[in-house]
Image: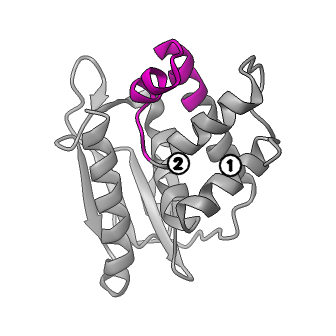
Amino acid sequence: MKVYRCKLHKDIQKKLISLFVSGVTARSAASKMAIHPNTATLFYKKLRILISHEIITNKKIEKTIEKDMEIQKPSISLHTSKGETHITFSLESNKEQCDSIIYIENINKKKILNIETLHHYIINKEKAKDLESFWGETRLLLKKYNGITTNNLLLFLKECEFRINYGSLEEQQQQLMTWANITI
């Protein structure tokens, strides 16, 4: 898969990818690149869609074992395997074997999620270090973006999964360039 319907020049795409990987927000990237903020925001969203698609299609781990815990709210299951953290979104988290759960509480009228609405609960205490690392990264990004809409939650979490599992910034940039079919 590649970034579809993008009319930006390849050099601008490369620079935006490097800014995305380094953690610069879309509006800051737009001002640095002297492009319209909506253009940078749309390109960042396309990158998040690309990351989500590639992670889901290349997923190496699938666990489905009955769990005793029941949560009535929509939740996100976290699994750790071989030092990597994987995310699954589920309305019925009791059917997934998971090491940790992120659940949503008290969504406001604007449907914006922030630190107060997302809660983290660790089930498997043996893997707490990896899970806390992921949750810490997620909280930092959530604070930086000052909340996200519920529509973008899965894309946001897949971005966090990408940042945790795909090594250094150079490796992440190279992987995104490969996925986006941009020559380095």
Q: Which residues are magenta?
A: 23-44
152 or 46, which is in the foreground?
46
Q: Which residue is mark 2?
A: 21
Q: Position of residue 134 (x, y in %)?
A: 38, 64
Q: Are marks 1 and 2 in contact (CB under 8 Å)?
A: yes
Tag 1: amino acid: Leu
The answer to whether one can see residue 100 in this image is: yes
Query: Would you say 132 lies left or right of 181 here?
Result: left
Q: Is residue 41 magenta?
A: yes
- Judging depth in this view, the residue of 9 and 175 nearest the camera is 9
Q: Main secondary structure of the magenta part?
A: helix
Residue 123: image quadrant is: bottom left
Q: Which residue is mark 1?
A: 176
Disc number at residue 36?
none
Q: Amino acid at mark 2?
A: Val
Residue 36 is covered by the magenta coloring: yes
Q: Quadrant of residue 145?
A: top left
For label 1, the crowd category at 10 Å Cα-Cα, with few meaning under 14, some 14 to 19 and many 20 or more, is many
